[in-house]
Amino acid sequence: MIWFPDWPVTAWYRTEAPALVDPLPLADLPSVEFVEAAAKDPDPLDQRPFRPVAILEAGTITACSPAARADGVSEGMRRREAQARCPELVVVPSDPRRDDRVFAMVLDRLEQVAPGFQVVRAGLCALPSRGVARYYGGELAAAEVLLDVLVEFGLPDARIGVADGLFTAEQAARLSAPLSRVEIVAPGESAEFLAALPVTVLSDAALIVLLRRLGVRTLGSFAALEAGAVRHRFGDHGARLHALAGGRDSRPHVPRTPPPELVREAHFEPPLELVDQVAFSVRSVADEFVATLSGHRLVCTELRVGCTDADGRLSERVWLHPAAFDAAAVVDRVRWQLSAAEGLRGGIAAVQLEPVAVDDAAHHEPGLFGAGVDERMHHALSRVQAMLGHDGVVTPVIGGGRWLAERQQLVPWGERAVTAASRTEPWPGSLPAPAPATVFPRRHPVVVLDAADAVVAVSERGEASASPAVLVEGARRRPIEAWAGPWPISERGWDAVRGRSAHRFQVVDTDQTAWLLVLEQGSWWAEGRYD
């Protein structure tokens, strides 16, 4: 069993830390022993070039870095308590997909020296010791080989435990000595090894509370209970934990099936200078990319294209597709990306195609009676987009925001937009549906008068000074038949420069035309019209 302490923190360092803080490369990160020793000596601790990090899930700390632990942060703390103990703590939201994605890369490296790993969870994996021990000359020698591989990969704090079952091996890895980082439990001695451990290692809060009330505080005491009585009192789940406490782990080893290699690359020597040259040369790689996916009954719906110039600079972007990428669509994305790429100089030396999201090909098969209207429209728009460029065909969507003009968004065909409907909560201060059919690109100046021809205003309490009676639009006076409002809009009240405060009104004139009006800083504006 290989255990990676605080794996969610490690995964975050691997992927997102360079963009948020300035940590050391992962291979140079201090180990647990260094931080614990440095905590006793304030000088080196104050000079560390990284910040303490904690992973947060549902308001609770689930993992933290050695630096955070040295400042008093621990798993199970609430966010406020952790930040009180460590004001410089970097709090990162939990992301299981990130943890799994990074851990898959670690397994790929490990399987180059020892195939057959089973993923227990991200940060914990198992391997049968018999075969690898026979090949490398013993369990300790095999463990040292695996640890050396992980050190080269930038994971110096991994721990290995060897035992009869998965549960005992995990506990052995967690209890391994800091220097050797390997703990081997002799065959048949699992129960003796586990006997002194607290029942908290079972990770079952309800059972732990009951066992403590019964005076059972160690695994040895729990294992000494009669199996039939445990099953009667705690059910099948309690019986299984009772067997684990006694070193009897019946779970079989199930090695993972390595995922297929779907990434494709094209290298150019010498580097290509023209976009059309790159697009023509990458066509064969795009065909191979799509054919490989088809061979696994998959299609790509989200594609990452990476273009590297002769100096090693990288231009990377993720492209979406309304259906699925074919070879021509892949080539088009490469061409569009190179046409709009900034920061690339000289020729293009390499292009990488990586599927970010795939789907079952059965979901994209043509219908029994041929392609429908949507499919024909997609093909037509895609052909026009291929001729005009990525921004040549756009789709209007209603986005988030408080002002109607900023809610109008034009999204290139095939891209996914973040719309107002995609939010789980309503946008504070936004106009509820239905939206006006006509939105003026620039607000029209108008005047709203009351029955005495005085300009209607809004008091500090948010009340209209009088009932709106006339809407003056240019030289035309429109008598108002009905009105509603005012509804306040407040943005960035803390910012004296960008802060905005206004009030919305809806009015209907005698021609039965509805208007959306805004009163801002004493001036009236027409924002839209309900046609």
Image: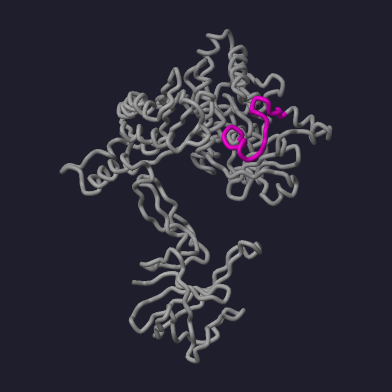
Residue 529: horizontal and vertical position, in percent? 39, 71
The chosen color scheme is one colour
Residue 322: horizontal and vertical position, in percent? 33, 44
The mark total stands at: 0
Quadrant into which the C terminus falls: bottom left
| Magenta stretch, residue numbers | 13-32
- Is there any visible trace of residue 202 in the rendered image? no
Is residue 14 part of the magenta span, yes or no? yes
Residue, far front: 475
Identify whether 317 is placed above or below 148.
below
Residue 260: horizontal and vertical position, in percent? 40, 25
The residue closer to the viewer here, 144 or 134, is 144
- Quarter of the view holding residue 52: top right
Is residue 17 part of the magenta span, yes or no? yes
Residue, far left: 369
User: Which residue is painted at 56% across and 21% down in the image?
Assistant: 164
